Structures are given as C-alpha cells and as structure tokens.
Amino acid sequence: MDLSGHAGTVTARRLHNVDLNLLPALEALLEEGSVSKAARRIGLSQPALSHALARLRLHYDDPILLRAGSTMALTPLAERLRDELRTVLDRVEGVVHPRTSFDPTTSDAHFRIRALITIPWLPKLNALLRGLAPKMTVQIVTPASSVSDDLVRQLASGELSVAFVSARLIPEGVVHAPLADDSFSVLSRRGTRLTLARYLRADHVLVSPFGGRVGIVDEVLSARGMSRRCVVIVPSFAQVGDLVAGSDLLATVPSSIARSLASVHGLRVLSAPLELPTNRAALVWHPRTAHDPASRWFRAQLVASLPAEMRPSQLP
C-alpha cells in the first residue's frame, strides 16, 4: 500500500470543501475583534464580512466572536487560531509570492564555507558582514580528506554553501568561478635574498591538511634530483606565522598568504629560488542556490574579501 499517496489524497479531500479565501477575513476578525473594523481593514462591506463570519462559525462549529458588553471577545478557539494564523498566512504568501529581493541588514542567514585557507580573506569578510549584515553568521568547514567528501551532495543539501577547491578537482554538477592563479613565496624571519643552496640547507615547515609528508615543492625538487628537510608538519597555515617568527624555519606558501602572515608576524617575504607551478583554485556552489538573492549577495561579499590578485573577473 502506498501510504504517502493515500495521505496526500486525504489531505486534498479535507481541503476540498474549505474556502481558503476566508482566511484573510478570519485574520482581520481575530486581529480587530470587530466586524466593522475588520471589514474596513480588508476592503469589504460589513454585510460581506458578516457573511464570512457566519461561514467561519459554521466551519469551526464555534462562535469565534462573542458580544461582551459594548465590545466583542474572542473565544478560546479563536485565541488559539490567532496565534497560528499569522504564521500560516506568511508561509502561504511566501509560497505564492516568493521573495525576489534580499535585505542584508535584517538577514540572519547562516553560510558554511569549505576552505583550507582562510588567512588572506576571513578577517575582511567578517568586517564586511559586521558592517553590512550584522545578523548573518559564517562557519568554516575543513574537509576531512583530500577526496571530494561527496562535495556535490553537501552543496545540494545545504550542508555547505560554497567551497574552495583545487581547479584540478572541480566535480561535475556544480557552478564554479576560477580564481586567479597565485604564485608561491617563501616566509623567513630574516634575509632579503634566498639562494637555492641556502633553501636546500634550511629546515622547513610543511603545511599538510591531510597528513602527508610531501608537498608540491618536494615533488618539484624530486623531479630535479633534489630534496629538502621538513622538520615540522602542520595541518593549516594558521600555525606557520608563529613557527617561522620564532625559529630559522622557512615556509613556502601561496604568495597571498605569505603577505598576510608577514604583516602580522613581522616576517620577510622572499622569492622562491626555484620555479614552482602556480596555485590554482576555484569557488564552487550548487545550481540550486545560483539565483537565490541571499546566496548571490553572500558570494559577492566573499569574492570582495579575497586579495585582489585572487578574485575572478566575474561571478557566474
């Protein structure tokens, strides 16, 4: 037996003989507590609203309004209906006339961003939102592994709002905006020039979100028959600044991150002494939110918070 279909039939049958146009009249009666005032409120004649009240009394088998001296009083059922009816009508109006505009100043939307790197842009995004959308909240979600983590499903379900991914790993079924390529730089506590020989002799900190012991630099060096020594491995760039500032460690990181960390920790940003591929990333989201006003506004603020050299020329 298909119970879901049966339930739908029962619901349709129970609503079949109900005139839903009576609900605005009921709302006016419950709010005003007067037939004449309710009639003026919704633009009906008093006899027409009196007729609507008679039909409502018949439907509910309840007087709805009772004379109490010179005024009218709501029955207990009417009191309960008043508490629920405004919410119901707001929801119905939202279905019939969905909002096509968005006011960030009153929005309490919550957005979840999957990202490995937040240093260059999260403080600016927070500042933008506090000024433009003070009730809006943001959550940073770190992927649990290097695979997609069922990214499309998470975006489709709303578990994630947007995600930063490698441009080489954009899954099918998402909308994406390629970010501008970012080069690599070396962070150091001191120095103005870095030779390859010194770079290879130094101890390094490696950022490895997924726990590996080899990064892109090591792959490039290995292809040239060389290697470096990574003595500290950390899961995110957040730990890099303090480590380099308090030691002779070198850290090879995307240039936008290097500049941010250098400004906070008083570090030097040096050119890498070997040619490295650029760091390519993309911002992705699900097609279901592509035209949602709140989501579109949020993505625009997120892109505005990125360093200028990372921003896409335009969003889809």
Image (cartoon, rainbow, N blue to C red):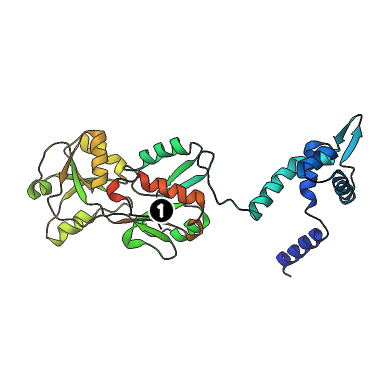
The residue closer to the viewer here, 138 or 56, is: 56
Q: Where is residue 158 in the image (x, y as percent from the top left)?
A: 51, 53
Please tell me whether residue 174 is drawn above or below residue 250 in the rendered image: below
Name the image quarter holding the N terminus. bottom right
Name the image quarter holding the C terminus. bottom left
The residue closer to the viewer here, 286 or 189, is: 286
Residue at (45% x, 38% y) in the render: 132
Q: Position of residue 293 (x, y in %)?
A: 51, 51
Q: Where is residue 11 in the image (x, y as percent from the top left)?
A: 77, 60
The residue closer to the viewer here, 293 or 170, is: 293
Residue at (43% x, 50% y) in the render: 299
Helix, strand or loop status at disc 1: strand
Residue annotated with mark 1: 163
Task: Report whether residue 173 is seen.
Answer: yes
Tell whether 254 sits left or right of 66.
left
Please tell me whether residue 19 is drawn above or below residue 41 in the rendered image: below
Name the residue at the bottom extreme.
1
Q: Position of residue 7 (x, y in %)?
A: 75, 62
Tally of numbered discs: 1
Tell whether 140 sits left or right of 45.
left
Name the residue at the top extreme.
69
Q: What residue type is labelled 1?
A: Ala
Residue at (67% x, 51% y) in the render: 93
Please tell me whether residue 305 is drawn above or below residue 17 in the rendered image: above
